[in-house]
Image (cartoon, rainbow, N blue to C red):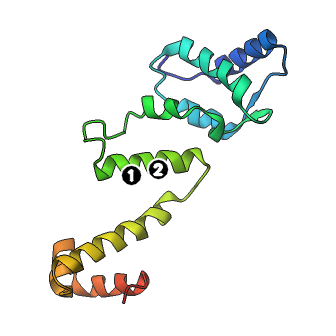
Amino acid sequence: MRIFRAWRARHFLQVAARELGVEAKLLHPETETALTRLAWPGNVRQLENTCRWLTVMAAGQEVLIQDLPGELFEASAPDSPSHLPPDSWATLLAQWADRALRSGHQNLLSEAQPELERTLLTTALRHTQGHKQEAARLLGWGRNTLTRKLKELGME
C-alpha cells in the first residue's frame, strides 16, 4: 500500500474494537501524519495487524505517535542509511532521531547541531594539539568562525 489511507486505518481500528469488545481507538492527527510517511511494505495486512495491535496496546483512547510499534519506523525508513554499516555515525544518528521523534521531541536540529559541532571541535583541536587555525582548516571554517563557535558552545 504505497499511500496510507486514514479511513482504512480508522476502519481497521473499528473492526478490531468490535472483535475485542472494546471502544474503538482514535488516531491523533500527528499520528495520522506519521503513518502517511511510512512505506507500508506489508500492504493492507500490515496496517490491519498494526491497528489490531494498537487496539490492545495503546495506553489511551487516542493513539499517539509514541504508541506506534517501533518496528514500523525501522522497517520503512526509506531515507535510512541502510547502505552504511550498522555502527556508522549516520546510522546511529538516524536511530537517535527516530527515537526522539517517536517520543514527541521537536526541533531536533537545535538539539543535535551544538553536540555535533562540539564533538567536531574537540576532535579537531585534539588532532592539531590545540592549534586553532589548523583545526579550523580541517573543519572547513575560518579561524574567526572556530573562535566564535568555541565561545557559543562555552568551550573557551
**Left or right of residue 133: residue 78:** right
| Residue 149 on image: x %, y % | 36, 81
Question: Which of the labelled discs sits on residue 93, or is there none?
Answer: 1
Name of the residue lying farthest toward the top: 19
The reply to whether the C-beta atoms of the residues labelled 1 and 2 are less than 8 Å apart is yes
**Left or right of residue 39: residue 126:** left
Of helix, strand and loop, which one carries label 2?
helix
Crowd tier of the residue under label 1, counting other residues whose Cα lies within 10 Å: few below 14, some 14–19, many 20 or above: some
Of helix, strand and loop, which one carries label 1?
helix
Q: Residue at x 34, y 46 (%)?
A: 91
* Three-letter amino acid code of the residue under disc 2: Ala
**Left or right of residue 82: residue 38:** right
| Residue 102 on image: x %, y % | 57, 44
Kindly identify which residue carries mark 2. Answer: 97
**Of 72 and 40, the residue lying toward us:** 72
* Three-letter amino acid code of the residue under disc 1: Leu
User: Distance between the Cα atoms at labels 1 and 2?
Assistant: 6 Å
| Residue 27 on image: x %, y % | 71, 31
| Residue 33 on image: x %, y % | 60, 36
Q: Would you say residue 141 is visible in this rendering?
A: no
**Left or right of residue 27: residue 18:** right
